[in-house]
Image (tube, grey):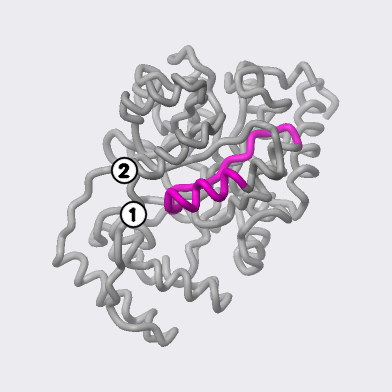
Amino acid sequence: MQLLTTRVTERLGIRYPIIQAGMAGGTTTPELVAAVSEAGGLGTLGAGYMSADRIREAIREIRERTDRPFAVNLFIPEPFEEDRERIEQAQKRLDRFRREMCLPASPDPGKYREPFEEQISAVLEERVPVFSFTFGVLPSEWVKRLKRQGTVLIGTATTVEEGALLEESGVDMVVAQGSEAGGHRGTFTGSAAKGMVGLMSLVPQMADRVRIPVIAAGGIMDGRGLAATLMLGAEGVQMGTAFLTCRESGANSVYRDAVRNARDDGTVLTRSFSGRYARGLRNRFVSEMGKYEEEWPDYPIQNALTRDIRREAARRGNPDLMSLWAGQSASLSRSLPAAELIRNVVREAQDRLQGKR
């Protein structure tokens, strides 16, 4: 047990240095978040696409299930260009998939994203123990207000430079997101290509640069990954794909099957679904739309434009048109209750660190 005691476990008040990633879009159900926290890790509600009212409801549901620490994750809003010509062209290209599923052509996408100030106000009002975020640096006003009430802050970095910027901003810990990670890239300085640093290179360099604890993320699915990143200088891990196939996950059966059947070379980086680079399983939508990668509207516009297609595909159980976010180690996934997954990861890591195998 002492082998896995770090500044992360001590500051967060958790038994094991394992954080369940705040995956947005419905996979991080209150049941999953609570189960992870109850098992000794830190469950995280992925609230990036939730309204403030829904965030409040989910937080209260989590608290009904556990009295252990948990986190809420949000996306830092970025400026974007509303290029009408690009939007119209994107709609025309997407209409072919709408026709396949008998959806209206070029629908009005509605609002592009939930108001961030309303979302984070809900987090503040509910006095969430841990707040994590990605896509940028949290404005100083919110850093001060959250820290004043004792909330632990965790930012996301894809380069050492970003990690240093987050430390300067006042966060308590930083997630080092390696290029292997599933879902959206957290890069916020320079191009997406600049942030494509592998985890084995990123963790020790970031650990040497910043004084705050580093949490490793990207391709970690079992105790081997936890042990390896601790040896590299991390003080905890953040795992996302590993929890997608847990019993408590909100991923539907089609998504779970796709993750379980993934190959080591089965993921790809794409802007086609959201307008921001994200790693997911290759499917027909990604393959056919890949030639337009640099022509899609910015995030979150493209994300809003594809919303109706993704939702209908999920309803029909059609993986070819779903955004199947997953990391490069998806083939190592296990279909277990969250508590059992955590127990296995802990046991495997302890065995490795003790040199048993």
Left or right of 217 on screen, residue 18? right
Task: Please give the name of the residue rendered at 48% of the width and 75% of the height, measured from the top-left corner.
Answer: 312
User: Which residue is the site of mark 2?
Assistant: 77
Image quadrant in which you'd find residue 307: bottom left
Task: Please give the name of the residue rendered at 54% of the width and 19% of the height, measured from the top-left corner.
Answer: 213
Tag 2, which secondary structure?
Answer: loop
Quadrant placement of the C terminus: top right
The span picked out in magenta is 39-60
Circle 2 packing at 10 Å, graded few (<14), some (14-19), many (20+), is some
Image quadrant in which you'd find residue 137: top left
Tags 2 and 1 in contact by the CB under 8 Å rule?
Answer: yes
Look at the picture and state if 88 lies above or below 206.
Answer: below
Q: Amino acid at mark 2?
A: Pro
Left or right of 235 on screen, residue 123? left
State which tag comes first along the sequence, 2 or 1: 2
Q: Amino acid at mark 1?
A: Arg
User: Which residue is the site of mark 1?
Assistant: 113
Given residues 225 and 65, the one toward you in this image is: 65
Count of all numbered marks drawn on residues in the image: 2
Given residues 98 and 28, the one toward you in this image is: 28
Quadrant placement of the N terminus: top right
Asked if residue 57 is among those painted magenta in the image, a careful observer would answer yes
